[in-house]
Image: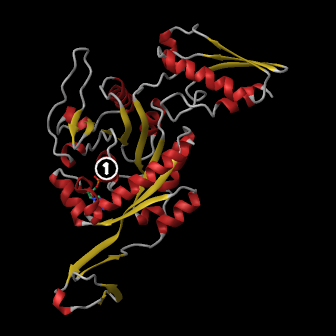
Amino acid sequence: MKKDQVIEKLKSINYPGFSRDIVSFGMVKDAEVVDDRVVVTLNISSQNQEKKEEVISNVKKVLAQSFSTVEVALSNDTPPSQNSSKTPEPILEGVKNIIAIASGKGGVGKSTVAVNLACALAKKGMKVGLLDLDIYGPSLPIVLNLHEQPQMTEDKKLIPLEKFGMKVMSFGFISGNDTPVIWRGPLVSRMTEQFFRDVEWGELDIMILDLPPGTGDIQLTLTQKLKITGAVIVTTPQDMALADVRKGADMFRKVNTPVLGVVENMSGLMISGSIPETKSVSKINLNGKEIDVDSSGKFSMILDLFKKGGGQKESDRLNVPLLGKIPILEDIMLSSDRGNPIAIEGEKSSAGKLYFEIAERLLKQINDLDN
Ligand code: ADP
């Protein structure tokens, strides 16, 4: 077995508590192979002895299958200042998974998906963080009806605001209504980094990142700064046909971030109504289609405004799952405007249920990544 094959094998070892491997974290400095013996040099800057030992034991375990002697050396020769740029120490040690919600362009409902997904995960009992990085159009102050300024700890760390059991942070909490539209890449990326480094996120099961729309440099920098578990791309059915999803998928692949799936938003218009129970009708004709009427007289249908099945076709082509389809629903829009995302109502509302199903499928995808 050669050095690059050893490195390849080490990619199966995740840094404890992360779904990212030790090679991509830059923790593997060298692997020297002499006949049946291998010496792996690790550079782990974390002070956590337990985690270090776990990594060493996993390296030994994985390589023992191919070598009779496996030695692990720890190198401390890199000064911490250089270390931080070359070997990205996990900056969010306490956060188990980071999921980026992205879209090719604005207005497709990316933020609405991000916030409802976060709410659904929180309602499922997970410790959730929601970070709105949409610097040019921060949505959290409105959709969560939050207008306080975050407080600082004594060591100058921002304390995230709390709402619906989630820890939340947004450029909008800091900049208020004065959206800094003239901010350029370097400043945005510095600010963004601060939102990871200088915010007391604490222990989280999952952090949802609401990325700015598009797949430009800012998004690329963000995804490189932070090791993201995976991305979800939000799009509308008509954009599916465009290069939108593909561009997003390409961008994440460039930085070795898996695309965990696509959410098709605004997939048709939900029409619903009811007829008096006394009529005891089991079907009605609506827009040329036979629709079932339930025992309480209620009926609903999805009117396809655009092409149908685009989401599924496009996800198949990209080989990523379609995590869900959300129709245009007045309830979704009104509840966001009121500062109470619909998913807070739980699965009892039909719109809320859609986000719970997406959350469930997303968790399955994350789980599959880990195994
Ligand atoms: P983006 O983040 O992609 O710019 P937003 O999430 O801010 O888009 O959504 C844009 C507008 O569309 C908001 O007013 C939002 O309430 C509304 N919206 C999003 N998804 C839906 C939906 N499925 N049904 C109805 N309105 C929606």
Residue name at image x 56 percent, y 18 percent: 53
- Quadrant in which ligand 1 is drawn: bottom left
Rendered position, 62 above or below 362: above
Would residue 83 appear left or right of 272 to someone viewing this image?
A: right
Q: Which residue, as the protein is rendered here, is positioned at the far right?
A: 35
Q: Quadrant of residue 277?
A: bottom left
x and y percentages locating residue 117 in the rendered image: 34, 50
Residue name at image x 34 percent, y 28 percent: 187
Would residue 78 appear left or right of 7 to someone viewing this image?
A: left
Rendered position, 209 above or below 110: above
Can residue 108 be seen? Answer: no
**Mark 1 element type:** helix
Disc 1 residue crowd, few under 14, some 14–19, many 20+, Cα 10 Å: many
| Residue placed most toward the observer, 339 or 49 | 49
Quarter of the picture containing the N terminus is top right
| Residue placed most toward the observer, 104 or 129 | 129
> Is the residue indicated by label 1 positioned so its CB lies within 8 Å of ligand 1?
yes
Can residue 286 be seen? Answer: yes
Residue name at image x 52 percent, y 49 percent: 249
x and y percentages locating residue 296 in the rendered image: 22, 81
Q: How is the image coloured?
A: secondary structure
Residue under circle 1? Answer: 111
Rendered position, 306 above or below 210: below
Residue name at image x 32 percent, y 84 percent: 292
Would residue 162 appear left or right of 326 to someone viewing this image?
A: left
Specify the amino acid type for callout 1: Ser
Q: Quadrant of residue 55?
A: top right
Q: Quadrant of residue 31?
A: top right
Quarter of the picture containing the C terminus is top right
x and y percentages locating residue 147 in the rendered image: 14, 38
Would residue 333 appear left or right of 306 to someone viewing this image?
A: left
